[in-house]
Amino acid sequence: MKQLSFFRKSSGSGSSIVEQTAGGSSSARGQALGRGRRRRFVWVLGFFCLWGSVICMRLVWLQVVRHQEFLDRAARQQQRTFEVAPRRGVLYDRNLHELAMTVLVDSVYAVPIEISNKAATAEALARVVHVDPAESFTTSTRILARMTASKDFAWVARKQDPSMIERIKALNLKGIYFQKEFKRYYPNNDIAAQVLGYVGTDDNGLGGLEQQFDDELHGTPGHMLTALDAKRHVLGSEESEPLPGENLVLNIDQNIQYIAERALDEQMARMKALHGTVVVQDPHTGQILALAISPRFNPNDSRHMDAGVLTNLAVSDVYEPGSTFKLVAYAAALDAAGVQPTDKVDCQGGSMTMFGRTLHDDKSDHYGVITVKQALEHSSDVAAAKMALKLGPAKFYGYMRDFGFGQRSGIELPSETRGLLQSPKRWGATSILSMAIGQEVGVTPVQLVGMVSTIANGGVYMPPHILLQSTGEMKGDARLQPAAFHPENELPEQLPDGAHRVIKELTAAQMRMMMQGIVLEGTGKLAQLNGYSSAGKTGTAQKVDPETHTYSHTKLVASFAGFAPVSSPAISVAVVIDQPTAGSAISHYGGATSAPVFAEVAQQVLEYLGVPHDMDLKLAPKAATAAIPREEPSEHTGDLNALFADLNELPADDPLRKPPATAPLTPNPNAEASGRAVDDPSRPEQTTVSDRTAASSINASAHQGSSGSDSNGPGFSGPAGAGRGGVAAASLKQSTAPAVSGSAAASSERLSADAVTSRPAEGGPAVVLDARKRVPVPSLIGDSVRKAIEEAGLSGLTLEAIGNGIAAEQAPAPGTMVPTGTEVVVRFKR
């Protein structure tokens, strides 16, 4: 019983223990289950957090890091962007004649993705556009390579002529399109080529002013944005307008430039020289009126340029000046050493030895004691050396620097050199002797013309300038007006930067007198002008032979630098001709090679500018020539009358076709003494004269130069002439151009008033004149070309000039009554 109860007790307690044990297990399981749930939640939460972080990182990578990349990819797929090139600025001469301009032309491009057979298309295009064997850009191989390299765009040929574009359009090829582009065009071809420079295919300046002012001329490009759909169809476009470049107005006068280049080219051909340079400058302002270099190149044909002629020798070519540099020694001696032109100097028989070196004058010069003026006239080396010795190295060097040597002038052209001029510390024992005669010093033609301009203007160095102004206005805008050159006899009140006095005014006057003696009595006699005084200095420098490294006796540089007229210089001219070879050795000297070029250029430029004569005209001028002479017909008078009738388109029965047997000595008594037109009822009421016949010759001789054009030159005009007869005839439409004088302008206005109407005629427009207005033909025999033009213009007539020199024959005869506007034919002879 006891055992049983114990058992029961034990069992009871066991049940309790079991129950207690079961209750504990359930609680633990619940806790474990809760922990599992929390763990799974953490894992899920962590997974989603990690997944979200990855998504965010990916979005950041795509939207931030690679944002621009995808924008560019989308743009390439959905848009096509073209850069719209700006119009490059125009280069004008001072009279607003275009020297370089921009025209619109077509370029050809392909969209390769639209072309199924690229090879066949490239071959077909190359057969048309590849016309230049030296040009590899348009070969079929290169065209195909560009098509293969890009899916959306490939150039085929750029900036083609309209005829070429029509041939390409005739092929009717799929995927070939045309785009307008600007092309640089030089209307006068090679005129002032080295000054203007040229541009590349993308209109980047590669030389001359085009390179120097490339940023200003280029302008700001625009853009055209075109939206495309999936099939590459255009949905719309947006365009930003390009900003055109600045226009540059140069100091160069196109007519003076042509005169200089023509004279230089002719002498280069005669002398068979290596190259040559002519610089024409206004001595009172430093403005460069012409800068001619020969040989030249055509900037319109940049693919066939000779690299040897691209350099602007006027600012980049350094040469030893020779005797022209003696002007520095003489001017400095007169200015600082108390030397006078009448002082005596011992030339020692043409030889002087110093520090072991012997200076020799020319073989024909063995002068003893002569005046300083005579020593300069005969270009004595011994006398020049003694002038420098009177100064000493320091002073002589200072004057050389003041005259602009050994430093850049600041002219607005690229690649200007400072020349060669060492400081006295680096001179040798005889360097001062060498420099006095133009050796051991290197100069440029621009520096040379600056030196003579300093003497010409009274002793003030004026820095040379070729740029007149930069402007945003185009020709035709009232705010942009031509700046025709009018010679002044005074320096500007406000001197420009870099201008400074070099020598005293008295010294400059003495030097002008001595330099005139060089032309009249010395080595520069071939620089004499007709009707004008001139002054200058010849120079002949030996070149260094690269093989022997010594001075050559056959390779020379001939130069001449001078100005005219002497009393009131209007222009300074420097002529440098390198290595003339034709003729004898003495003909290679500066006095024989370069002085005639100076004479021809100075004579024509002074006539063109209307500078008054300060000397009597010679009956047989040596240097005065018409700018563009006409080939003379036979000498008998009948030809002149026939030409007169043809020029004025006279009817077959017109009495003016039959010249009177004896020319009347006095005009019709009904005519007024002043030469004004009078009524003549005996003539038909109206006579038709061609537009060219009614042209006003006064406008042709205008100093400002309303230009015309002819086959021989780029729009040359002036009293020396242009066109068929050597005299530029401006049409009635140009009668508003400035004339040479008030009376001449009045004649032009009267002539315009006489033209009552106009009508088209076969072969061109015609002007109908009131034939009742008649004037007597003045006597032009014995007149120069310029004077004949003026006299004819004052009578209301125009003039057709034949030949050069002095008027010898005319048609019709003096005193003949003719309608105003009639063209008189005059033959000029030397």
Image (tube, rainbow, N blue to C red):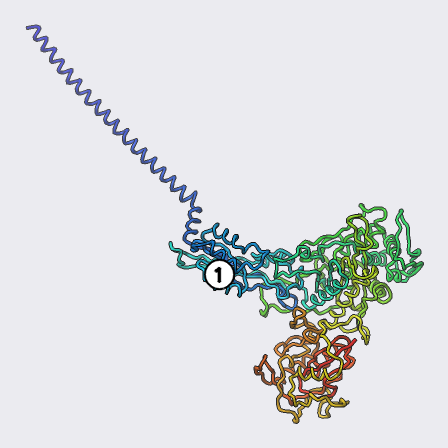
Residue located farthest toward the bottom when viewing the structure as drawn: 682
Q: Secondary structure at mark 1?
A: strand
Q: How many marks?
A: 1
Using a 10 Å C-alpha cutoff, classify the residue at mark 1 as few (fewer than 14 neighbours), some (14 to 19) or many (20 or more): some
- Would you say residue 504 is visible in this rendering? no
State the image coordinates of residue 187 (x, y, percent, origin top left): 62, 66
Quarter-of-image position of residue 231: bottom left
Judge whether 548 appears above or below 818 on screen. Answer: above
Quarter-of-image position of residue 192: bottom right
State the image coordinates of residue 721 (x, y, percent, origin top left): 70, 74
Judge whether 718 appears above or below 422 on screen. Answer: below
State the image coordinates of residue 557 (x, y, percent, origin top left): 78, 57
Quarter-of-image position of residue 592: bottom right
Left or right of residue 284: residue 695 = left
Q: Which three-letter amino acid code belongs to the residue tagged 1?
A: Phe
From the image, which quarter does the C terminus lie in?
bottom right
Q: Residue at x 19, y 22 (%)?
A: 26
Q: Judge by depth and name the residue closer to the eye, 606 or 456.
A: 606
Left or right of residue 86: residue 323 = right
Q: Judge by depth and name the residue closer to the eye, 337 or 274.
A: 274
Q: Residue at x 52, y 52 (%)?
A: 141
Left or right of residue 642: residue 181 = left
Residue wearing tag 1: 178
